[in-house]
Image (spheres, rainbow, N blue to C red):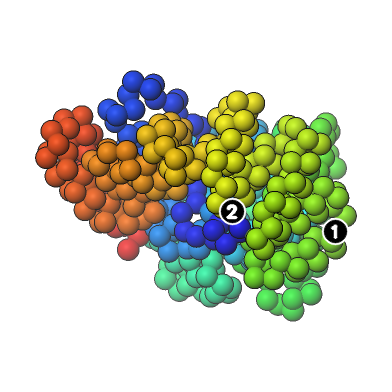
Amino acid sequence: MQRRYLTCLGIVALCLAPAPSSAALDLELPEPPELPSLVSSNTQAVSGEEVRLGRAWLRQFRARAPIWQDPITREYVDSLVARLLPYSQLSGIRPITTLVASDQLNAFAVPGGVIGINAGLFAFADREAPMVSVVAHELGHLSQRHYARGKARAEQTQIPAMAAMLAGMLIAAGGGGDAGIAAAMGSQAAFIQDQLAYSRRFEREADRAGLQTMAGAGYDPQAMVDMFRTMQRMIALQGGNPPEFLLTHPVTESRISDAQGRVDQMHTDVTRGDSLEYQLVRARALLAIHDRDPRRALTRQSRDSVPEDASRYLRALIDAEQGHAGKALETLDALSRQHPDLAMLPATAAQIALEAGRIDDAITRSRHQLRLMPGYAPTTLVLGEALLQRDPDAAYRVLHDLAGRRPEDPQVFALLAEAAGHSERQAWGHLARAEQLQLTGHIDRGIEQLDVAKKVAEQSGDTNALSRIEQRRDAFTDYRETMEKFR
């Protein structure tokens, strides 16, 4: 089951747009958020530039990095960032998170509100609060605008810095380790040298902002200090070959002391302990990392004091992976009865039913859950994919609604294109395929799909499609111009 999650199409979008009305389903595809225009007259314009560059950076990253495509984990991270955001001092940006299929401990933040998290971070953090501390720290970098402290500085350094970051992150995501930082430093040595004088201050600022974010959201800020100390021990054990996160976020004794001092002065009301939901997500990450040898995932999980239900969940995932769907579904149904508020349990069961070829069961399970938990995106995605086998027109309606709420999700548009094609909406199918291509960094191929969509729309006399295609062509051209800055 997990192998399908290690493909290159996963993405999450926060701040969802309203769903279109059913009457508009054949009139237009949902429109991805427009990237703000590049102007330089005030502070808000600089923020708009960061958003534009960040989205373009992400498209390039998706095109070349090993993206971990797991809608359930994506939904968890989406919800977590949304939970932290009100306490992060970050405003004017709609964050997008992307999951990386790498066992390396790493997370990163990119101007414009892009947050990346490796599967390896979940594996490393055996409790939720330490993982939250890393995400809160990255939000701190964004809120403090560490990549563009001033307007003039941003104009001079931001694009080359982000291009260097892209090169480094791609090498790191591919397992290059130290080479990722070496590439960034080699390609933009002047920028890196210029930033070194600020790096310790920036890290401490991000720590302080992250501690406040954690405390505001009800998490114990002490977890950040504990995470730092665990990382220090990792450096000692690995003998000078630290993970990528520690190369970009060096942990020093003075930094730990500063964070501990601030925690000691904070009066926090800790309302969030370790959650079973996090342990279920961590189980998914462990299996994604060890998909070729699932026993290693079980062994690694057993080293930690995890709830028995998290172990049962991991064993169910492994059963499904090994072709024992019936056994897996029995376990998941039992867990769902024990934990009726955990949406990922019935969603996992519906996904397993779909992958096992139990199409009608997947549809029944999905519809049942969505009646109880309307709008849960992973289950909606399963329902749309399953309906493709039974009722393409219904699949189109379901996926069209989901695309309206998740306009930055390439996987949704890929399925929407298929549903449109099977339900005699050919022009709209090509348009959806174009959206999926541009979201994954293949902008030239996306524009080619727009040309095909235009010809089909002209032949069929679909004026609504023609209008939409011309509108999207302008946006695609804008995307291409921005993406070329990183080439």
| Residue 399 place in picture, x, y as percent | 43, 37
Residue in the picture at 27% in, 38% down: 425
How many C-alpha atoms fall within 10 Å of the one at disc 2: few (<14), some, or many (≥20)?
some
Q: State the CA–CA distance, disc 1 to disc 2.
A: 31 Å
Q: Which residue is mark 1?
A: 304
Residue 210 vs residue 256: left or right? Answer: left
Residue in the picture at 67% in, 67% down: 290
| Residue 324 place in picture, x, y as percent | 69, 58
Please, what secondary structure does the residue beneath circle 1 have?
loop
Residue in the picture at 47% in, 72% down: 183
Residue 18 falls in image quadrant: top left
Foreground tag (1 vs 2): 2
371 or 289: which is nearer to us?
371
Which is more N-terminal, label 2 or label 1? 1
Rendered image: mark on residue 356: 2
Where 177 sits versus 152, above or below? below
Rendered image: mark on residue 425: none
